[in-house]
Image (tube, rainbow, N blue to C red):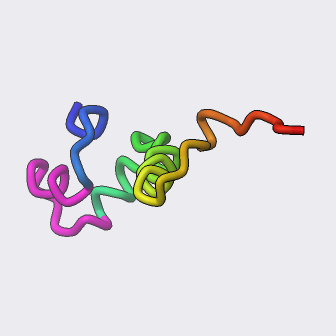
Amino acid sequence: MLIHAGASVKTVQLSLGHSTPTVTLNTYVHEWPDVLDRNRLLIDGALGQHETAATPAVSRA
């Protein structure tokens, strides 16, 4: 529930009492399937780009 609500690895680790974030990732890495797409969107937004993997560029030819 925490992961799907957008909680960070560190937050999940602390909440579940895991000794390290690595333990959390090794256990729940499959629950973060959209993390790469979300990171791409954040970087594109920071760079002022409107074209992302989720919204492909329209051909201007």
Q: Pick the residue in front: 41 or 2.
A: 41
Could you tell me residue 20's position as x and y percent? 21, 69
Prevailing secondary structure of the magenta residues: helix
Q: Pick the residue in front: 29 or 58.
A: 58
Task: Kindly identify the residue that appears in the image at 44 percent across and 50 percent down.
Answer: 45
Residue 60 picture quarter: top right
Q: Is residue 54 magenta?
A: no
Left or right relative to 32: residue 8: left
Left or right relative to 26: residue 41: right
Residue 17 picture quarter: bottom left
24 shown above or below 2: below
**Extreme right residue here?**
61
Task: Kindly identify the residue that appears in the image at 30 percent across and 33 percent down.
Answer: 4
Could you tell me residue 61's position as x and y percent? 90, 38
Left or right relative to 35: residue 10: left
52 shown above or below 13: above
Could you tell me residue 35's position as x and y percent? 44, 47
Task: Kindly identify the residue that appears in the image at 47 percent across and 46 percent down.
Answer: 41
Could you tell me residue 23's position as x and y percent? 29, 62
The number of discs equals 0
Q: Is residue 17 magenta?
A: yes
Task: Kindly identify the residue that appears in the image at 26 percent across and 56 percent down.
Answer: 9
Q: Quadrant of the N terminus?
A: top left
Q: Pick the residue in front: 28 or 33.
A: 33
Q: Which residues are magenta?
A: 9-22
